Image (cartoon, rainbow, N blue to C red):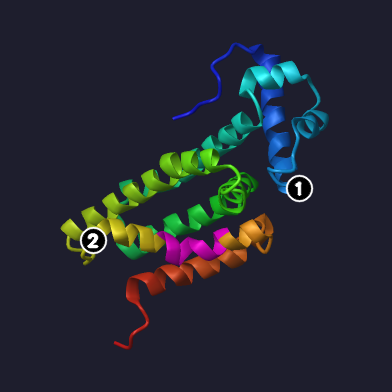
Amino acid sequence: MHERRKVDLARRGEERAEMFLQSAIEVFLEKGYRQTRLSDIVARAGGSYATLYRAYGDKEGLARAIMERGMNAFDEAQGLLLASDAAPEAALTETALRMVEVILSPVQIVIHRIVIGDGLAFPELRDWYFEHAIRPAERALGEYFRCQQVAGRLCMTCPDVTANRFYMAVFARAIMDSVMGFATPADVPRVREEVRKAVVIFLNGVLPR
């Protein structure tokens, strides 16, 4: 997995690197990844190009650092699911509510706008994110479903396909709305309720009992 360059920036340099990253998130949200120039980020953060280049290399390095930050938050939510002893409906609901807060965070909105909105223009970033974030997340959720199947709590023919369908059923609308600007961090309470209902529909379906 790509990581930010291991360089000795000293405390002041590390603080400046963090300012560059936060400024990049803000500018990417405002202008989009494709339209943003490094000069926009340096002007927002202050500091020198030399420090930015040393810490991140270039604009793609900044984008990957943002992706890593979003991946860490997502991994934490999934780790709690894998460790949960709660019934599937409770465990999946709690995890989904945590994940939707990540999805509608500025960091994750930037990520999804890059990989979905600009994926054709920047296939290296798109493919890197799918390989290091999307596929591992689906594998982890597939393992959860597999364990629940063995325990007799859930019944399915293919846990991995179930994991993919869970993501699409529960999170796809929130992701697309955030990419198009229809959902922001301010919409988290509304989207949490939508996600809660989506989990119920996913587990129970809509056929009459």
Query: Which tag, 1 or 2, sits closer to the chain's start?
Result: 1
Image location of residue 40, percent across then percent down: 80, 34
Q: What is the secondary structure assignment of the residue under circle 1? A: helix
Q: Is residue 118 left or right of residue 206?
A: right
Classed neighbour count for the residue bearing mark 1: other residues with Cα under 10 Å, few (<14), some (14–19), many (≥20):
few
Give the magenta-colored segment's residue range. 167-175
Q: Is residue 167 above or below residue 111?
A: below
Q: Is residue 198 above or below residue 136?
A: below
Residue 53 in view, yes or no: yes
Q: Quadrant of residue 121?
A: top right
Whether residue 168 appears in magenta in the rendering, the answer is: yes
Q: CA distance from mark 1 to mark 2?
A: 41 Å
Image location of residue 157, percent across then percent down: 21, 65
The residue pinned by badge 1 equals 30
The residue pinned by badge 2 equals 158
Confirm or deny contact between disc 1 and disc 2 (CB under 8 A).
Answer: no
Q: Main secondary structure of the magenta part?
A: helix
Specify the farthest residue to the bottom. Answer: 208
Q: Is residue 144 left or right of residue 192?
A: left
Disc 2 marks a residue whose amino acid type is: Cys
Residue found at x 66% / y 15%:
11
Q: What is the secondary structure assignment of the residue under circle 2? A: loop
**Which quadrant does the N terminus fall into?**
top left
Q: Is residue 203 left or right of residue 153?
A: right
Image location of residue 22, percent across then percent down: 69, 35
